[in-house]
Image (spheres, rainbow, N blue to C red):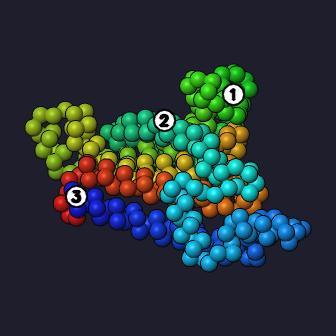
Amino acid sequence: MLRYLLTRLLSLALTLLAASLVIFVVLEIVPGDVASVMLGMNATEEALAALREQLGLNDPLVLRYFTWITGFFTGDLGMSYTYRVPISQLIGQRLVVSLPLALLALALSTLIAIPVGLIAATRAGKAADTSIMGATQLGIAVPNFWFAMFLVLIFAINLRWFPSGGFAGWDNGLFAGLKSLTLPAIALAVQQASIMARVTRSATLETLHQDYIRTARAKGLTKRQTVLRHALRNAMIPVLTILGLQFSFLLAGAIIIENVFFLPGLGRLIFQAITQNDLIVVKSVVMLLVFAIVLVNFLVDLAYAAIDPRLRLRT
């Protein structure tokens, strides 16, 4: 197990190194002067010189990369040109919205998808299976921003059960914060639950045709016991893969939903930073999201090993 863990840690470190180099180089080769891009064509030479000094553009390329990456891992991400506050402070303010939103959406999609996928698999070819697969196809096809507007129309404008947008803040209590995130989380969860339900069904169906499942039934286990004790565990590896990818998407790809509901999250921060040419914020936030994605994939690899010991023995 130790060798497996060390191998995955080395892979994580190399991936982060490669990602940081790509992000740094891409923003360094932006056509024209970075300071001119951020300040615009009408900026004075004094303002350009001051910004170049602030961003360290006068330093050698290798030194700039080393300063940025060490600052990233020590929490010193620099100062946002647009907001005039430390980038770490900006990220902290937005992360308390985006992270709970992603976790809530992931929890909702998992609670819906796995039972639904199991029901469809155990009733393959029947009316329940056909209905579930049709519903999941619709869930995948409908854009989440359209579904978000539908939720606002029904539950915010007509029924007035939830706010139509904005974030109440955790200072006003856990209930107020979760209430603000409920509709966005549902809008994000529907599509992800549809995908996960289909993967759960396919993986479970494949597992149900294995010899050990027939042996378990021959020993007297009921169909329910066989599915829950044996089939589900062995079908969880592809489901875990989808879970890892979905969490990464929910954390980094909720830009449209955050804009629909006017949520001050990381997705909205990236959108605003791009429109305002605040490239230093873009660079740091994108690197943070890459780190989160790589870390989640690392945790998924560990979950693989916990579910299937054969993976540990192969390494």
Q: Give the position of the N terminus as an image quadrant.
A: bottom left
Which residue carries the number 2 mark?
Answer: 108
Give how far across and how far down residue 315 sits, in percent: 22, 64
Which residue carries the number 1 mark?
Answer: 163
Q: Amino acid at mark 1?
A: Pro
Image vertical order of residue 210 relative to residue 262, above or below: below
Q: Amino acid at mark 3?
A: Leu
Give how far across and how far down residue 313 sits, in percent: 18, 60
Image vertical order of residue 119 relative to residue 301, above or below: above
- Between disc 3 and disc 1, whose residue precedes? 3
Which residue carries the number 3 mark?
Answer: 2
- Between disc 3 and disc 2, whose residue precedes? 3
Answer with the quarter of the image where residue 12 lies: bottom left
Mark 1 and mark 3 in contact (Cβ < 8 Å)? no
| 152 left or right, relative to 177 | right
Instruction: Tell me the element at label 1.
Output: loop
The residue lying at 38 percent from left, 35 percent from top is 115
| 69 left or right, relative to 230 | right
Give how far across and how far down residue 32 sits, in percent: 76, 76
Q: Residues within 10 Å of mark 1 (few under 14, many from 20)?
A: some
